Image (spheres, rainbow, N blue to C red):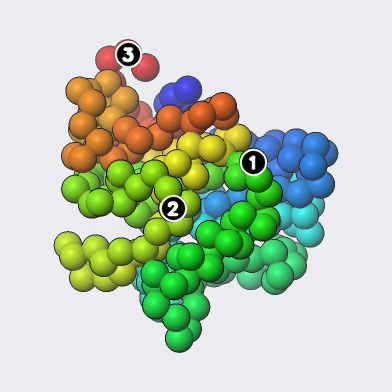
Amino acid sequence: MVKVLEDQLQLSKEAAELFVKLAAEAVEVHGKFTVALTGGSSPEKLYDLLATPAYRDKVDWSKVHVFWGDERWVPLDDDQSNAKMAKRTLLSKVPVPKENIFYMWADGKSPEEYAADYEQMVKKELGESLKFDLILLGMGPDGHTASLFPHQPVLHEQTKLVDAYYLAPQSMYRITLTAPLINKAKHIVVMLYGDNKANALYEVLEGEPNVELYPSQLLHPESGDITWLVDKAAAALLKKH
Ligand SMILES: O=C(O)[C@H](O)[C@@H](O)[C@H](O)[C@H](O)COP(=O)(O)O
């Protein structure tokens, strides 16, 4: 489903309400809420909102298990760290037990080693279903999501659930959930805004199949659902949504 909102603030409020709803449902059904956060700048307002009493007080944070959809392979105090942004905006303000936060970073390990470790943590936490209750994602102007970037071999990974690789255009290692794992989620929410993403969103949702160029085309939940939360500017080129 594609929901077009007025602007970033309305989009973030919609995402916050969805987060609260899905968290309550998951805790009701199986006693915890497993969520993979996204990085980038788009979710910052969402995380800020979730830390305000209006939303914070509606979530049983003791039952929330926090993962990431992807991460830059940098220390947690690095300004490029997705975890650092999430800690600053949300995780330092809500009572998630620290043992329920699974950072995508380990000092003294290679990214490849740690991707394998993270995969084991995911398997242990999710059980054999491998279903996250919610995976939050953003999308770049090039159509990437998580760290599934154009022309990268990781786009075709069908066995690993978590992978790490050197992203040459950004001169850094990335660690990411792979498409097979993402598509097992019960709920995928992709949030994006701004006219710089209008072309990629059109190509992803209505253009010719071309995952090499537009990796977000890989987002097809097996049995769950996907909600695209976009603002009017990002939706400007859509014809069928
Ligand atoms: O590590 C990252 O950069 C993110 O996880 C990435 O996939 C992000 O969602 C997109 O790049 C969109 O980023 P913006 O929200 O900043 O446009």
Mark 2 element type: loop
Image point (61%, 50%), residue name: 35
Among the two numbered marks 1 and 3 on one chain, the one whose residue lies closer to the N terminus: 1
Mark 2 C-beta closer than 8 Å to ligand 1: no
Specify the farthest residue to the top.
240
Asked if residue 155 is positioned above or below residue 186 in the image, the reply reads below
Among the two numbered marks 2 and 3 on one chain, the one whose residue lies closer to the N terminus: 2
Image point (23%, 52%), residue name: 152
Q: Which numbered marker is on residue 129? A: 1
Q: Is residue 56 visible?
A: no
Specify the farthest residue to the front.
159
Label count reads 3
Q: Position of residue 19 (x, y in %)?
A: 63, 42
Q: Position of residue 207 (x, y in %)?
A: 22, 23
**Label 2, label 3: how far apart the Cα atoms are:** 34 Å
**Label 2, label 1: how far apart the Cα atoms are:** 15 Å
The residue that label 2 is drawn on is: 160
Asked if residue 115 is positioned above or below residue 232 in the image, the reply reads below
Q: Which label lies toward us, 2 or 3?
A: 2
Mark 3 C-beta closer than 8 Å to ligand 1: no
Looking at the rendered structure, the kind of residue marked 1 is Ser
Image point (66%, 50%), residue name: 126
Side of 123 where 201 appears, left or right: left
The residue that label 3 is drawn on is: 240
Asked if residue 91 is positioned above or below residue 19 in the image, the reply reads below
Looking at the rendered structure, the kind of residue marked 2 is Lys
Q: Position of residue 53 (x, y in %)?
A: 72, 53
Image point (43%, 30%), residue name: 220
Q: Nearer the viewer, residue 150 or 12?
A: 150
